Amino acid sequence: MTTIPAPASVAASRLPASILSPSDTFAHRHIGPSEAEIQAMLETLGFTSLEAFTDKVVPESIRLRRAMNLPKPRAEHELLRDLKATMAQNRICRSMIGLGYYDTITPPVILRNVLENPGWYTQYTPYQAEIAQGRLEALLNFQTMVSDLTGLPLAGASLLDEGTAAAEAMAMCYSIAGGHDESFRRVFFVAADCFPQTIGVVQTRARSMGLDVVVGDPATADFAAIPHLCGVLMQYPAATGAVADPRDIITRAHAAGAKVVVATDLLALTLLTPPGELGADVAVGSAQRFGVPMGAGGPHAAFIATHTEHARRMPGRIIGVSRDAQGRTALRMAIQTREQHIKRDRATSNICTAQALLAIIAGLYAAYHGPEGLRRIASRVHAFARVLALGVTKLGHTVTNTAYFDTLRVKVGPGSVQAVVNAALQRNINLRDNHDGSVNVSLDETTSREDLAKLFEAFNTTGVHAAPAFNADALLSDVRDVLPPALARQSGYLTHPVFNTYHSETEMLRYIFKLMGRDLSLAHSMIPLGSCTMKLNATSEMIPVTWPELGNIHPFAPADQLKGYHKMFSDLEQWLAEITGFAGVSLQPNAGSQGEYAGLLVIRAYHEHRGQAHRDVCLIPESAHGTNPASAVIAGFKVVSVKNTPSGDVDLTDLKAKIAEHRERLGALMVTYPSTYGVFEEHIREICDLIHEAGGQVYMDGANMNAQVGLCRPGDIGADVCHLNLHKTFCIPHGGGGPGMGPICVAPQLVPFLPGHPVSKPVSSGVHATGAVSAAPYGSPSILAISWVYIALMGAEGLRKATQIAILNANYMAKRLSAHFPVLFKGSSGFVAHEFILDVRPVQPTAGITVDDIAKRLMDYGFHGPTMSWPVPGTLMFEPTESEPKAELDRLCDAMISIRAEIAEIESGAADKADNVLKHAPHTMQVVCSDAWNRKYPREKAAYPAAWLRDAKFWPSVGRIDNPYGDRNLVCTCPPMAEYAS
């Protein structure tokens, strides 16, 4: 046997310490281009290094010349392990607090295949309807479900939360009553037994709109004696759990000229007469208990429903039925002229982000269970409540609500409230102490016999919390009916086949994947939407979202049960403050639009506190983000527009003139940086100084923060408040149109005014806190874990490089495409920021091709179109993000160059001006495979215009949609199934 001697050098060698470091680091997974690709793009742009390129593009005057003070980047496996340990500090109790938040069972087929599926959560808002038919159908199902259960014919595709929905309904009532007339109907009555968080959000909105809120008992209120009453809000069932017939209240409110809004519970409406049949004008509420985890407050899909005549006053989005170019049924977002981007300061709502993903889950939950299944769930919950009521009565306590659905208000007789609450907590159950000698107990879909046994023990105060001599089954024969016969639901609901077909898991699984297959998402290809930042939503970031430690927590649970959450909140607030250069952060706003609103409210509160409430003018440059004017109006400001120069910069001459004109009333400037035109403005510091010198505050829209992180900071530049779109820069996925988060970061003088909450005060709440802007104190906490993980994985160096690559990718694409289409705006350096605008208007007079034609033709190449006609009509705005590799950037560039060649064929006469691949785009499989083909171009050119499509082809499921037809023939509930196949 031969022994092979070890090399002599082995004994002397020394391994580097780095060899023991984790191998699953993350930054290179998030950043798409390889180092070789980065160098190739730099060479194309004439640079030898990324630092030299950054120095050229980002103005020196705003640069951050130090590393951000953030923890070192973590590896994926160890980070998830440590986060799991942190979240284990949360205590998961059986939640019986109620107030609009309930434990629920997310059907596993929906949990795994929708909530945890990037084919569903990485889609964009369905503006390009031809490649969003699956999501649109799922949202139409949600609307139909809400319409059926509320008894009102028109429902929206979701709102942010129940409090926001109630505030939007108040704005609707005001608008219907004549709105903006200083002397007319500016009073809104709110029932005192509405959810307290809803009352708080409504009061905040009312103050900003100059409305008066009267809180009282609608049963005894004399509406006729309340001058200028525009609307009444009531809760059915009430926060106390009581179920009362509201018909008399509705009749009296209508007699006084007011509209009636009913906040309600969809599960209860399977047993109760719906608001529409009772005479209500608007119904609002939350669909959370339809399979969406509590998540310490969100995200959840709120709903709003009303009568068809109020369609153009409805906030948010409505999905409608239309037809495509071949006359087939096709879905789309209806009445899109209502969008605040278009109406700007004339908008009645600033809602931008919705809760599409959560609405989809709720709609699928209803389809999975069907009408009979939902009624069975509701009847079971109600039966548990009736059994509990009998049991606590036997134990000497009093149930104060004689009629109820799932919630009891129990006046504690023998013993004390605290003793009952403590005994329940010892048994891992949270009750709500009403601080009036009573507790609320809310039951739900997850309630069990064991839960009732523990509750009986907790209420058995005379037996020192021992088990009583009865159990739930023994009481069943003695329970009584408690719902008023006049309120028993008689009408049918969910009769459409979609709610009566997919009740087996096999059928539901196939339905989910059928719909998913009709949608283009980031799982298919790049989505290059300017200002929307469709970047990687990494799996490691998404995994914690569905952990029970995050999902099964009530937002109003005792603080010591949320220790893990509070550690995450604290970390995230510190990190975002460091990233932005600000002193304080509020995580409460649960959308970018809410962040804008909250930031402006903080500015108004600051001025009011200093005795300058008259400062109500908000200057907004034409280059600002599209939601800004609407948010300013909702926050109570008067909008004054500021011009832009031809280069896209704020016109300093016009700005100075507007400041001089409105100096005494100047409250704020809203500026987007880099501008929506995709440029770094050299004089941004001067702009901030001008506003401050005139006594105003600077609001910086954080929509374009993806061009700033690690390179510059809004607080250093001179801004006083900035909201952050966590669903853009910080990786929360768009979910087909929501969820989102929009926390605000503020300078020291604004910290005392950060939002508070009427039920559970956030740690960040200021000493002079503004009112609540969201129903939950921390907005949508469960998805904050996504941004926490992203920042922790990337670290300061990774975040900075991500920003550099986002800017590099945009400039590389702009360089390649500039030879074919003009790039409309560039900074003084000759480069763009992280997004750029292509001017396609020159081809309209030469070829008759519009921006819509190009966007639809891109679908044939397998891409979602970029942002169309905004901020400049007739243009396309691209934002590639840092997550896309060079090969994908090149594919999109090749597609645009190929489309330009197709346009050239029309210009030369080689292609017909009307019958060509652009005018007929997109091409569906049905059209291409049809026996009838009489077009003046070959099928292959229609279907396979690029070589890569032969490897993987995404087919639009419908042809180009007829938008005007859909608005002229407004249908916003599910059409007959036969129409889908027509």
Image (cartoon, rainbow, N blue to C red):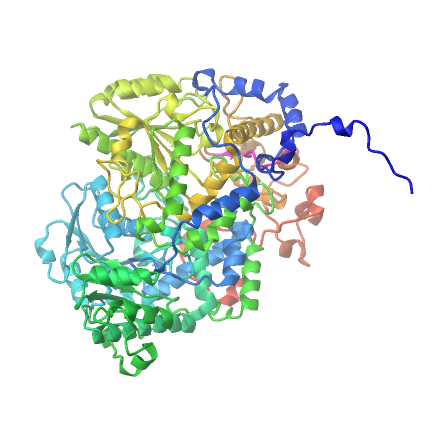
Closest to the observer, 982 or 147: 147
Q: Residue furthest right?
A: 1
The residue lying at 60 percent from left, 27 percent from top is 812
Residue 378's quadrant in the figure?
bottom left
Part of the protein shown in magenta: 874-886
Please determine whether, in this image, residue 803 is positioned above or below residue 553. Answer: above
Please determine whether, in this image, residue 941 is positioned above or below residue 293. Answer: above
Task: Let me know if residue 880 is in the magenta part.
Answer: yes
* 792 displayed left or right of 969: right
* Residue 340: percent from left, percent from top: 36, 41
Rendered-image quadrant of the N terminus = top right
Q: Residue furthest bottom?
A: 477
What is the total number of numbered labels drawn onto the structure image? 0
Please determine whether, in this image, residue 956 is positioned above or below residue 473. Answer: above
Rendered-image quadrant of the C terminus = bottom right
Residue 509's quadrant in the figure?
bottom right
* Residue 808: percent from left, percent from top: 57, 27
Residue 638 visible to an observer of this rendering: no
Majority secondary structure of the magenta segment? loop
Task: Let me know if residue 411 is in the magenta part.
Answer: no
Closest to the observer, 708 or 515: 708
* 110 displayed left or right of 601: right
Residue 243's quadrant in the figure?
bottom left
Closest to the observer, 281 or 377: 377
* Residue 971: percent from left, percent from top: 41, 59
* Residue 48: percent from left, percent from top: 64, 18
